[in-house]
Image: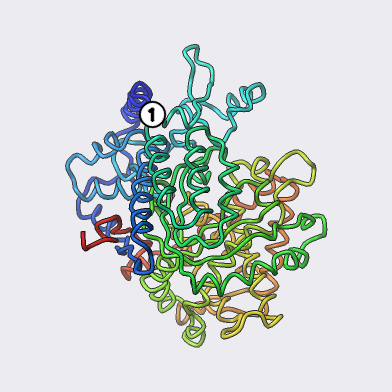
């Protein structure tokens, strides 16, 4: 990014902070209170067995870590301004400084983006991807003549005359993109897998021209790569104004070949499962790509948006609708991160809130399956609205991400039930998946309404409870699943979501979120109980070359 652009962004951020009230009651400067917020994250060391990798491939891993680290300063700019400006708000308090680092800014991502530093004010819905003084109406009027304003890969800024203009990502973040691209190209020369080398070269090109589709197709063509990397502007979660702007992130991954081989066979079922979705035919007329695959990985580095708030434990990419329809998507299960969340968070939540006679149904295999088929379900349903006016993402704007996450949850459960009924899943039961899913709802709603996954799970919790899928025993304070009612409620919610997406019904989705995307008082009491028991809300990482290569 140009130094002039950095200075302008920093000045804008400082002016915005100075203009805000200094007395927000939600903000904290009390060191013990801040340390308690830091402590709600359990620390996990990101390691993996690299003994099967050649020396060259080990060097590839090092280079990929260096590449994805470039996503961190970019995401700071996209969400707040500069990292140094944000950390200056800590005023020497180490706990506050650490919590700013965890959240990439002074707003608590697990508490609906409440400010935890006095004076910063509410987080802008558009983060730092749009001018702070821009209105939705102004943007829509300008976008009518300048569609580039809606591009995934531009920052919106004001021109000298005050009008809205764009700065392409490859220009705004030229320094970081060039550095990352150089590392990717260096890694490509050392890679043992030629298809992976091709992807790295194309991804490096994309970082320097903002044209990502060719690299997305190349990523889908890889099958045998022992290492993987996700890097660049990808998800639109940070843009809660419109959901148009992609935030920068990165993951470095080591493939678990044995687990991946066991998962691969499920991709063949996708077209048939699409046909059986519990919704009218027009909402399932699209055919998912058959080149999709499922793989398990150890994640050894998170960067940028991926490393904020509630951490991702599975990935479904690419997001490009054209690539999805032609090739499908790849689902990456982050096995070590899933295990860490299950052991450190899910198990104690289940002990606290799941009825004793159903507790045996909560298990890691069910949690892994629920997570896996959540990602698989992203590839089902409908990507383009029935009126032919564009994609679901464009029609639903800032609501698109949360509704898509909810669809993935419930359609994933629908798929698991179908596979059990066909005898394709064995060794467990649908009761395991339903009970583990309930425990998972308590885990995810703690992310808060500002998080797409958290909001999705609030809607799901309220919808399923209203349909009698589960109930609380007042005597024990614990929840039991009604398994028959759960299956019916899952199908009903899946149909509701798929219809809203196909219709591009922005008003209907907004109404659903207003009615169901809230934490009722009794649920809040349960969440407070979990906090009182000291159960972590999420995880943070010890990661990097020094952790992965301790012999250095």
Can you say whether 342 is above or below 122 in the image? below
Classify residue 433 as left or right of residue 529. right
Can you say whether 319 is above or below 16 in the image? below
Residue lying furthest bottom in this view? 357
Can you say whether 49 is above or below 18 in the image? below
At a point 77% along the width and 62% down the height, the residue shown is 279
At a point 38% along the width and 75% down the height, the residue shown is 348
At a point 40% along the width and 53% down the height, the residue shown is 309
Q: Quadrant of the C terminus?
A: bottom left
Q: Quadrant of the N terminus?
A: top left
Does any portion of residue 117 appear in the rendered image?
Answer: yes
Which structural element holds mark 1?
loop
Q: Position of residue 266 (x, y in %)?
A: 64, 71
Instruction: Name the residue nearer the viewer: 397 or 485.
Output: 397
Q: Label 1: which residue?
A: 1
Using the rendered view, name the quadrant where residue 468 is placed.
Answer: bottom right
How many neighbours does mark 1 have within 10 angstroms: few (below 14), some (14-19), or many (20 or more)?
some
Classify residue 17 as left or right of residue 517. left
């Amino acid at each position: 990014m140009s130094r002039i652009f950095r200075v302008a962004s920093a000045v804008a951020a400082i002016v915005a902070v100075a203009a805000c009230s200094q007395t927000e009651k939600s903000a904290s400067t009390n060191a013990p209170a801040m340390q308690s917020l830091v402590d709600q994250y359990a620390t996990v060391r990101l390691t993996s067995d690299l003994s099967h990798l050649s020396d060259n491939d080990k060097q590839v891993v090092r280079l990929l870590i260096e590449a994805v680290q470039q996503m961190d300063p970019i995401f700071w700019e996209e969400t707040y301004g500069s990292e140094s400006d944000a950390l200056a708000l800590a005023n020497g308090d180490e706990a506050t400084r650490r919590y700013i680092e965890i959240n990439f800014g002074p707003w608590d991502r697990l508490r609906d983006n409440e400010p935890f530093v006095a004076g910063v004010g509410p987080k802008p819905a558009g983060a730092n991807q749009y001018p702070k003084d821009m209105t939705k109406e102004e943007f829509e009027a300008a976008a009518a003549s300048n569609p580039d304003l809606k591009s995934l890969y531009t920052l919106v800024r004001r021109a000298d005359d005050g009008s809205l203009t764009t700065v392409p990502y490859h220009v705004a973040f030229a320094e970081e993109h060039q550095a990352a691209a150089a590392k990717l190209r260096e890694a490509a020369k050392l890679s043992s897998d030629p298809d992976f080398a091709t992807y790295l070269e194309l991804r490096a090109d994309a970082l320097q021209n903002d044209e990502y589709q060719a690299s997305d197709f190349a990523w889908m063509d890889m099958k045998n790569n022992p290492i993987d990397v996700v890097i660049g502007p990808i998800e639109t979660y940070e843009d809660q104004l419109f959901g148009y702007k992609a935030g920068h992130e990165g993951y470095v991954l080591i493939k678990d070949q044995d687990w991946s081989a066991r998962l691969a066979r499920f991709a063949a079922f996708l077209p048939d499962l699409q046909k059986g979705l519990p919704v009218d035919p027009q909402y399932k007329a699209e055919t998912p790509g058959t080149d999709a695959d499922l793989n398990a990985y150890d994640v050894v580095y998170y960067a940028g948006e991926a490393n904020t708030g509630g951490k991702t434990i599975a990935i479904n990419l690419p997001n490009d609708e054209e690539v999805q329809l032609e090739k499908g998507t790849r689902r990456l299960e982050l096995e070590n991160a899933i295990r860490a969340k299950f052991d450190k968070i899910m198990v104690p939540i289940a002990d606290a809130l799941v009825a004793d006679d159903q507790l045996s149904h909560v298990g890691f295999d069910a949690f892994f399956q629920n997570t896996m088929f959540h990602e698989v379900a992203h590839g089902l349903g409908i990507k383009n609205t029935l009126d032919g006016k564009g994609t679901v993402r464009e029609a639903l704007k800032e609501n698109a991400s949360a509704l898509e996450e909810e669809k993935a949850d419930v359609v994933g459960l629908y798929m698991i039930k179908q596979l059990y009924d066909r005898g394709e899943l064995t060794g467990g039961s649908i009761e395991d998946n339903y009970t583990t899913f309930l425990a998972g709802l308590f885990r995810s709603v703690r992310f808060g309404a500002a998080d797409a996954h958290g909001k999705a799970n609030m809607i799901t919790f309220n919808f399923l409870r209203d349909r009698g899928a589960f109930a609380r025993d007042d005597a024990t304070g614990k929840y039991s699943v009604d398994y028959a009612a759960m299956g019916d409620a899952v199908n009903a919610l899946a149909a509701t979501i798929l219809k809203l997406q196909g219709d591009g019904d922005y008003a209907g989705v907004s109404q659903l979120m207003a009615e169901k995307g809230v934490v009722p008082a009794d649920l809040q009491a349960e969440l407070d109980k979990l906090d009182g028991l000291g159960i972590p809300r999420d995880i943070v990482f010890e990661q990097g070359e020094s952790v992965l290569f301790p012999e250095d």
